[in-house]
């Protein structure tokens, strides 16, 4: 009798060795440094069928917002797509700040919020967290931030204890600005410090020196009225294990309430990539060296009794850091998006607003939700969301999932989990898997591999691993300066092309309504399925569909 274990191993055996290695890992005893060739996508999951028809996007948005929300919590994401300057390592820069641009943008953002007023989905359970991300939200004047805060309170049902986070850079947070944003109701500030070391900061175009950063963080902490969160990054140019340790010491000595430890990823075509390739900056740490820095930080954290791990990258010091937004965004809860370039999720539908500022403003002022990309729920999205929530917490509890979903992933995936255990990535005891420090470093790979293996077992068929977006710093360090790779917008197009082509090539989805819509659109334009593999043709198709939007009804007129 064939068991689930037999089926899993048989499916993996059918895969080409290079694809199987993405899931199982390399044949090595040094799991920390060599478990996988590269780090996998940050946003794990198989993804659902892309919905490219703008009229269908609007219809689905209206339908979703008209439904009653029955979840146990939800959050709102507000995107502020402006920066006063571009950090060298950033691959997602959108717009330089200007007073006129930001005034006009806030007009549109307030209007987008107003258009959601009265939606049934927003009634009932209140919004428990609002996150201002970017970009650099602290580039907003206090007056413009106040306009948005007023609109949030007017049009959305915010909880009495709603966590409201303002992300920003330390240069903006003068004592006067801190006092002003706290008076507006901001109760959590998140700062991308990256490093306290002045030389390291200057190398990646951070403005302020070490003492200025320390003084401003100290002021925020001592107000006693706000949770202060910072990001530190490991693997930057000029960063050593010594100044990395100093960064860790400073953040804890300041009494920072929480923070994140992030690995530097060198984005293709970023200023940092070009600076390293041209010899203007030394190379940052390799992936293996970054692994050592990560484990060092975990051990340092373990020796500080008051520090608690919240998830694989986030920590908290004391009770002020509630991490409500971070908690709510894991699993299957709503994330309602507002703003140019904002991403959200409703009932498993993933979506992103226009990244282009003129297109965003035009759509909002025409009365449409400014959606650029949308994808339907992936197969068994609620179950997969629960698995991902566990994995973000550095564990997988088969008994809990069995009680709720009648499926025990730990048992079904045990042969591969045991291989990972031999590499030192996980421990497995009965129906509980926990990630070791090495596994936590490679957690993106493990999460993605688990979701792919569960999908293969459900379909009893091989699924090619998702490798459309991987960390490339090791290979980019040797890439000639003239060899440029895609920018952020092009990467989104590539991702959508890959996703749509995958579903159109799958016979199981031949009659899926959104696949049929895409085939009909291709036929009308004299195109074939093969054109989805051409960025130029894909953009032509996308632009044609967008141009049809002028004939689409406004929200509430369907």
Image (cartoon, rainbow, N blue to C red):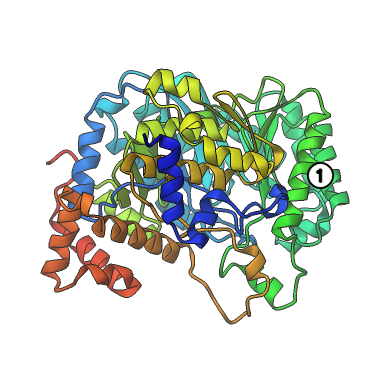
Q: Is residue 294 left or right of residue 523?
A: right
Front residue of 163/262: it is 262
Q: Residue furthest bottom?
A: 482
Indicate the secondary structure of the residue bearing disc 1. helix
Classed neighbour count for the residue bearing mark 1: other residues with Cα under 10 Å, few (<14), some (14–19), many (≥20): many
Which residue in the protein does label 1 denote?
247
Image quadrant containing the C terminus: top left
Kindly tell me whether residue 23 is visible in this rendering.
Answer: yes
Rendered residue at 49%/20% (across/down): 399
Rendered residue at 37%/39% (across/down): 345
Can you give x and y, in whole percent of width and height, for residue 512 in the image? 18, 48
Rendered residue at 54%/41% (across/down): 416
Quarter-wise, where is residue 532 in the image? Answer: bottom left
Task: Judge whether 512 appears above or below 346 on screen.
Answer: below
Can you give x and y, in whole percent of width and height, for residue 4 in the image? 41, 36
Q: Residue furthest right?
A: 242
Task: Judge whether 203 appears above or below 27 on screen.
Answer: below
Kindly tell me whether residue 465 is visible in this rendering.
Answer: no
Front residue of 424/156: it is 424
């Amino acid at each position: 009798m064939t068991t689930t274990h037999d089926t899993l191993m048989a499916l993996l055996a059918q895969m080409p060795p290079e694809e199987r290695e993405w899931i199982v890992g390399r044949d090595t005893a040094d799991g920390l440094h060599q478990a996988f060739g590269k780090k996998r996508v940050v946003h794990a999951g198989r993804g659902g069928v892309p919905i490219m028809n703008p009229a269908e996007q609007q219809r689905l948005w209206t339908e979703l917002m008209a439904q009653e929300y029955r979840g146990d919590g939800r959050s709102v994401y507000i995107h502020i797509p402006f920066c006063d300057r571009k950090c060298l390592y950033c691959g997602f820069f959108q717009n330089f700040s200007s007073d006129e641009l930001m005034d006009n943008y806030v007009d549109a953002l307030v209007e987008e919020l107003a258009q959601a007023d009265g939606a049934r989905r927003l009634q009932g359970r209140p919004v428990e967290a609002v996150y201002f991300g970017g970009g650099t939200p602290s580039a907003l004047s206090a007056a413009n931030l106040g306009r948005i805060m007023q609109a949030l309170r007017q049009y959305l049902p915010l909880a009495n204890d709603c966590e409201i986070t303002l992300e920003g850079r330390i240069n903006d947070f003068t004592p006067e600005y801190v006092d002003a944003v706290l008076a507006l109701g901001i109760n959590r500030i998140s700062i991308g410090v990256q490093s306290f070391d002045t030389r390291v900061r200057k190398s990646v175009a951070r403005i302020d020196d070490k003492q200025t950063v320390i003084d401003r963080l100290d002021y925020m902490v001592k107000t006693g009225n706000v949770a202060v969160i910072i990001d530190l990054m490991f693997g930057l140019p000029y960063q050593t294990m010594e100044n990395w340790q100093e960064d860790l010491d400073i953040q804890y000595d300041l009494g920072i309430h929480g923070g994140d430890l992030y690995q530097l990823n060198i984005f293709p075509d970023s200023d940092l990539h070009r600076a390293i390739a041209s010899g203007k900056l030394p190379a940052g740490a390799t992936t293996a060296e970054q692994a050592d820095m990560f484990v060092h930080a975990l051990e340092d954290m373990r020796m500080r009794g008051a520090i608690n791990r919240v998830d694989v990258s986030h920590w908290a010091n004391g009770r002020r850091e509630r991490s409500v937004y971070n908690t709510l965004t894991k699993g299957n809860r709503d994330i309602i998006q507002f703003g140019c370039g904002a991403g959200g999720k409703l009932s498993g539908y993933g979506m992103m607003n226009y990244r282009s500022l003129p297109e965003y403003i035009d759509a909002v002022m025409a009365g449409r939700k400014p959606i650029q990309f949308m994808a339907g729920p992936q197969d068994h999205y609620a179950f997969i969301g629960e698995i991902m929530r566990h994995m973000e917490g550095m564990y997988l509890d088969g008994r809990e999932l069995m009680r709720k979903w009648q499926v025990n992933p730990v048992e079904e995936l045990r042969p591969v989990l045991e291989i990972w255990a031999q590499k030192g990535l996980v421990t497995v005891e009965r129906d509980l898997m926990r990630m070791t420090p090495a596994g936590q470093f490679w957690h993106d790979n493990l999460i993605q591999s688990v979701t792919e293996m569960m999908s293969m077992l459900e379909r009893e068929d091989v699924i090619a691993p998702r490798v459309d977006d991987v960390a490339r710093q090791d290979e980019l360090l040797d890439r000639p300066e003239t060899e440029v790779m895609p920018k952020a917008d092009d990467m989104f197009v590539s991702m959508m092309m890959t996703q749509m082509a995958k579903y159109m090539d799958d016979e199981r989805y031949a009659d899926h309504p959104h696949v049929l819509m895409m085939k009909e659109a291709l036929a009308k334009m004299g195109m074939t399925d093969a054109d989805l593999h051409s960025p130029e043709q894909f953009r032509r198709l996308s632009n044609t569909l967008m141009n049809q939007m002028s004939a689409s009804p406004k929200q509430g007129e369907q």
